[in-house]
Amino acid sequence: MAAVIETCGLSKVYGDVTALDSVSLSVEKGALFGLLGPNGSGKTTMIKVLTGQVRPTGGFAKVLGLDPAKDGVGVRERVGIIPEQESPPSFLSAMEYLEFVGAVRKIPDIAEKAEKWFDILEFGDKKNVLCKDLSRGTRQKLMFAQAFIHEPVLALIDEPLINLDPLMQDVVKEFLSDYVRKGNTLFLSTHILEVAEEICSAVAILHRGRLLHAGPVADVRAHGEHLPGFFLSLVRKGGHA
Amino acid sequence: MHSTMFGSVSFALFPVMIFGIVFMGSFLLPLLSAAFPAGDLAFLAHATFLLLGFMVGGFGLLGNEMMNRRFGQASLLVYSARSLPLSERSIFAHFVVKDIFYYFFLWVLPFGAGYIAASPFSGVPLSRALLLLLTLSLSFLLGLCVVFLLSSLYVRSKTACLLAVVFLGVAAGIYTFWSGTNPALLFPPYLLYSAFSWMAFLATALAIAVLFAASVVLFSPEGRSSARTYRRVLGRLAKMLSFLPDSPIVAKDLLDLARSGIGIGQTLFSFLIPLVVIWFFLSLLRGSLPPHGLIIIFSLTTGIIASTIYTWVTEFDSFGPYSCLPVSVSTLIAGKMTTFLVLQALPAVFIGTVATLSSGPELVAPVIVLCLSISVYAAGVMAYLCGLSPSVLVYDVRVLITYLVLDSVALVLLAAVSFANSLYAFLSLFLLVPAYILVRAARARWDARDPAGI
């Protein structure tokens, strides 16, 4: 299968901190790919580099055939992104924010599509509330809606379930599985290992910016291990390396 | 925060630079005294520090929203009232005191110290130099506390704030009418500098303390308890503005300014009130200037202050909220610049009104052109040097020196030619060329870097 994301020796250094250290991986079309790692392991930086928000200091990446370092806007046009921290503009209402996204992305019938997302994520009663007055969970729903409203073939999402109640987590997990079943690709950054084990087809494990493992979840299970145990032993070993 | 952003050395050099400029500038005093009476120069210095206080003093506007948006680090401090046994008001008072010291050591003290250090060479008695440091500090504090009080009042009740401003304006007008004297001459720190007395000093210090205490008491740290709702406006506004480039960004910025109250707050506290006060101060120089010199100087001053509207539209959001959208830093700078240009209607109307009332209709057009040209040029310089973070990066010494040099050259040249003939003010239109080049260069320059704020 064709790779929709490919990185080779990808590095990112912020001053004295190496956030990514020569990471090479490949994500195939139709995968639900989980990027796992402890806090500060480089997961968020990876998403920022892949979506052209920051430039790598070494190596290269290809996302849907584009180099995000050279054409970040082109990459962001084609993909959906949920950033680490939900940050819709404070003084727009939820509906206006989706209208704004629609205007920037040139999405036709944006009002209709927005209504659909208010229904799916059950927050239609909040659509006229200013974003700054929304609860964190509702803001997370809004960021989820903006990431998928243009029906991208690839989405890079950072901790999408955080701040959501268990019922909504279930709705979102179901949506993500369905999204991938339709042939789209999902790059999911999380440190909730149980979720990754439940929905991901393949995972990569980052620790201190280095790639410790990349491969199908089925391979982990084939060795008689569960993902959480595998992850913990790998990171602990990596931590002492 | 500033030292983290551009290195502690560059930040530490900022007060050193102010000291150096004033120290060197003090040697020009004999030359300047030949053109202006010594009293006028001291008056201008007090007016400048009053203005600095005005610019810093809008603390009352820092409700929860501003804390959330502008001061990430301060938010942690301010919100510690929720987890520690401290009241929000006491934390806020500490925050304000901290900021007063911050600006005092950044601006006021280096200015006074430069003047004091030069006093043995400039022929100014040390006691006068020390007195100037004292009265400039009082000017700064007075400006800060007046605006702090008005902005706290504004957040509590816009009507009460408006009434207070109208009352002050009417009182100044009545005084001028009855006495025929400019009320700026009653400015306490300047009176103190002219004729020092301990009683006058104590009265001024007491007035500052009362204003400060009243401001803290009136300050409302609590945000609105209920969620605000709005009907859909963005789409219609963006459509109305569709003749502009990046109209969704412009529409969003205008809604930000309107709904946050910051648009009116900034207009009042960072534009109208400082400029009205500056007018009273500058009008004292009328005798030392050509017939139309006062409105020319005022137009240039208004232009520089109008250029800071670029900071109003950039302080709302960093690149963060746009990072998940197909928007580049370059597009964002262009969008903010378009919003800035739309908002230039405010200085145009203001300076046009002042010119009509003070100098006659024949000066309206040249003065508006002069004001807007310098404003657009200075904003272009700001965009080039600071990108989307002008209110933070201006404290980088290299940035500030470049900004001052580039703006000063334009200001001096335009003042000189416009003094000679007011119609020459139209020459300022040529500034639009470098302004355009600077904005283009700014877009390329800041696009080539990792954006701040994500």
Image: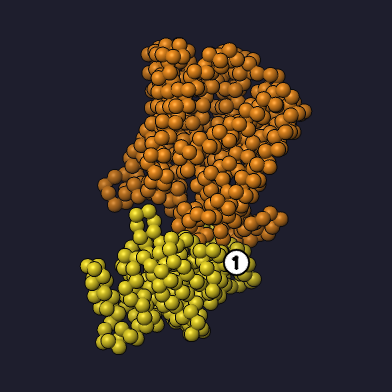
Chain colours: A yellow, B orange
Quadrant of image for the N terminus of chain B: top left
Q: Residue visible at 45% across and 40% down? A: B396
Q: Please name the residue that numbered disc 1 is placed on.
A: A105
Q: Is residue B82 left or right of residue B254?
A: left
The residue lying toward the viewer, choosing from A201 and B404, is: B404
From the top left corner, tell me how far across and down residue B180 is, in percent.
Answer: 62, 14
In this rendering, does residue B419 appear at all?
Answer: yes
The residue lying toward the viewer, choosing from A24 and B345, is: A24
From the top left corner, tell me how far across and down residue A73 is, in percent.
Answer: 56, 64
From the top left corner, tell me how far across and down residue B420 is, in percent.
Answer: 72, 22
Q: Residue visible at 34% across and 44% down? A: B88
Q: Is residue B348 left or right of residue A226?
A: right
Circle 1 chain: A
Picture quadrant of residue B209: top left
Q: Residue visible at 41% across and 39% down? A: B10
Where A152 sits versus B415, above or below? below
From the top left corner, tell me how far across and down residue A97 is, in percent.
Answer: 55, 62
Picture quadrant of residue A157: bottom left
Q: Is residue B72 left or right of residue B315?
A: left
Q: Residues within 10 Å of mark 1 (few under 14, many from 20)?
A: some
Picture quadrant of residue A212: bottom left
Q: Is residue A85 left or right of residue A94?
A: left
Which three-letter amino acid code belongs to the residue tagged 1? Answer: Arg
Q: Residue visible at 67% across and 29% down? A: B414
The residue lying toward the viewer, choosing from B122 and A10, is: A10
